[in-house]
Image (cartoon, rainbow, N blue to C red):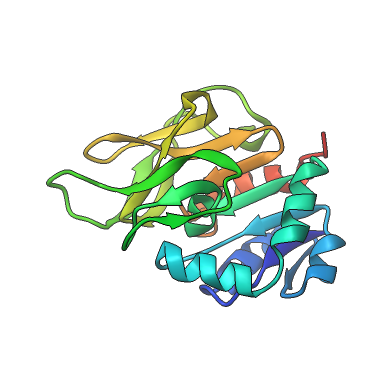
């Protein structure tokens, strides 16, 4: 069962609909016991980093999520959910994240329009089961003003250029994160979610 964490941030139903469309077993969960029963966990998110982190901590699911990751079960962060995986964010001050991956979330510093809204290509950096059947250079749908600056460049699974190169997909062991919205990214996004559902614990 894929658990979609409901911690009061964003519309979860587009994501659930994308999973339901592919007949993947998924549930929106809002308590630790439901989360503990999941084989796979997705942490979505929209909006600003600090309110999202505050809401997640208030939901009381941090300990169970860390246990899920420690047990080598598949975990996926989406958009702000991916950003929460990192140590810190500079959005509206300096704030602490979950620290599952090393790095800091920073704002775009270029003359292009911010936020980036719309379709952009992802350059695959290495083979990974999350991207099976997804062509290098596929387009995904982005909405964001901030991105993760990695402490370890080997965590980058896919890169995108928007005024500068940034990690659109990150991975380490049983953890993955995507800056774009797979549920809004048509066939490549649906394939990514299907691939995630097929991942096995390490």
Closer to the camera in the image, 2 or 71: 71
Where residue 188 appears, x then y in whole percent? Answer: 53, 45
- Inspect this view and state whether residue 56 appears: yes
Residue 50 appears left or right of 126: left
Picture mark count: 0
Res 179 seen here: no
Quarter holding the N terminus is bottom right
Q: Where 161 falls versus 10 (above or below)?
A: above
Q: Quadrant of the C terminus?
A: top right
Q: Please indicate whether residue 101 sits to the left or right of residue 130 in the image.
A: left
Q: Residue at x 21, y 39 (%)?
A: 163
Residue drawn at point x = 43 percent, y = 62 percent: 49
Q: Is residue 110 above or below residue 84?
A: above
From the viewer's perspective, is residue 191 above or below residue 50? above
User: Taking 121 as reference, is 197 left or right?
Assistant: right
- Percent position of residue 200, x then y: 82, 39
In percent of width and height, residue 160 lies at: 36, 36
Picture residue at 47% right of the left edge, 33% below the top: 158
In this rendering, the answer to whether 117 lies above or below 160 is: below
- For the point 73% across and 52% down, which residue is it? 66
Q: Of residues 127 and 164, which is closer to you in this image?
A: 164
Q: Quadrant of residue 100?
A: top right
Nearest to the observer: residue 42 or residue 128: 42
Residue at far left of view: 111
């Amino acid at each position: 069962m894929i658990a979609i964490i409901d911690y009061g941030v964003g519309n979860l139903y587009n994501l659930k609909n994308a999973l339901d469309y592919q007949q993947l077993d998924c549930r929106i969960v809002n308590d630790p016991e439901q989360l503990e029963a999941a084989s796979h966990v997705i942490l979505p998110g929209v909006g600003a980093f600090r309110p999202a982190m505050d809401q997640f901590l208030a939901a009381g699911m941090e300990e169970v999520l860390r246990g899920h990751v420690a047990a080598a079960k598949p975990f996926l962060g989406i958009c702000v959910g991916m950003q929460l995986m990192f140590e810190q964010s500079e959005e509206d001050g300096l704030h602490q994240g979950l620290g599952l991956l090393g790095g800091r979330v920073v704002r775009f510093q270029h003359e292009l329009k911010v936020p980036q809204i719309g379709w952009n290509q992802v350059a695959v950096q290495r083979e990974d089961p999350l991207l099976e059947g997804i062509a290098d250079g596929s387009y995904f749908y982005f909405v964001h003003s901030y991105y993760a600056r990695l402490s370890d460049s080997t965590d980058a699974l896919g890169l995108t250029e928007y005024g500068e190169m940034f990690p659109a997909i990150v991975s380490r062991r049983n953890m993955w994160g995507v800056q774009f919205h797979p549920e809004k990214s048509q066939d490549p996004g649906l394939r990514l979610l299907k691939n995630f559902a097929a991942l096995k614990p390490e």
